[in-house]
Amino acid sequence: MTGKTTLPILLAGLVLLAGCRDEATPSSPEPLAASDLRAFVTPELASSLSSDGTFKLPAPPEGLRVSPRRAQELALAFARTFGPYVLGTFERAHGQSINLETLQVGSPAYYAETPFGSLPEDVHPGLRNVYGPYYMVYLVSPDGTPVLVVGVSGITEAWIENGRLRFPLQYGNDFYTEGVRLGEGFAKPLSPEQAVRRVGEATGVPVSALPQLFRPDYGYHPVFARWKVTLDRPIAVRSRASQSTQQVRELYVGLRGEFSVPSAVQPKEHTRVDFMTKRTLRLPVHPDHPVAFEPVALSNP
């Protein structure tokens, strides 16, 4: 499986379609709901569960251009507007024919925070989008089967007109999308409830804080967003690469439920040349928002 966006399909200068190489279909689809989570969280965190068993996650930052509800509407309009041009790509990824007009929103709009500082308003929107936050939205068939997962920029200036997507004169990196294989379920990324359940079941340690979703580093498809899950006490994990062990209280749950921890070395900034003005831009990386990770396995005590 490759993490970085491979040779993408560029559609109208704004849409990148990329993803993982095919893997075996899971034995059962990843569900969105996680039933009763109280056995996997502290009593304090249990109070943050709604009556339907989902977490009451914080609202996105004030002043963000796109709200969660608007992100859902934009994701659906995107699929219906531009999906016909790449329908064959979607169907090959999904493994079955797709009726774009019958798709519907099948999940909350999960807000993935950005680790990067903001760019000046006079920078091309395509650059601002690619370093900014994204929402992750699942589109499903009428029977509830996930068909597409769409990353929607939290600062896109796109709008909907007569059910179809429209853009200003300058745009780019407003949407990323990927087909969801039949039988895979809601695994790109998992729901916050499933991420917490995975960690609680695997470690036997209750989760003590609301999960937070962070978008991946620059150059990675938004489906590689990770949930940060904080445990009530430290556990031992082993690096899959070096086999070294360490004690951690935070596990990051990524694509298809993979566990990872931040790498020891993290970049402090990203440098990028604005292709419009040719000036060099320096984006700080938030010290509490890691962008480099290593996969881990749980280590025996």
Image (spheres, grey):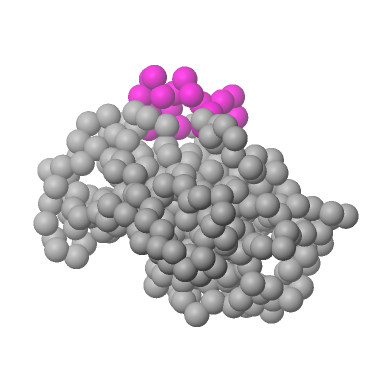
Q: Main secondary structure of the magenta part?
A: loop
- State the residue in front, 3 or 143: 3
Q: How many marks?
A: 0
Quadrant for the C terminus in the image: top left
Position of residue 244 measured from the top left corner of the image (x, y, whole percent): 11, 56
Position of residue 155 measured from the top left corner of the image (x, y, whole percent): 60, 48
Whether 278 is drawn above or below 158: the answer is: below
Quadrant for the N terminus in the image: bottom left
Q: Which residue is the extreme one toward the right?
A: 162
Query: Which span is picked out in magenta?
Result: 37-57
Quick check: is 259 in the magenta stretch?
Answer: no
Is residue 189 visible in this depiction of the protein? no
Quick check: is 44 in the magenta stretch?
Answer: yes
Residue in the picture at 41% in, 59% down: 281
- State the residue in front, 9 or 167: 167
Residue in the picture at 32% in, 31% down: 206
- State the residue in front, 268 or 183: 268
- State the residue in front, 134 or 205: 134
Position of residue 69 measured from the top left corner of the image (x, y, whole percent): 69, 40
178 relative position to 236: left or right: right
Whether 60 is drawn above or below 162: the answer is: above
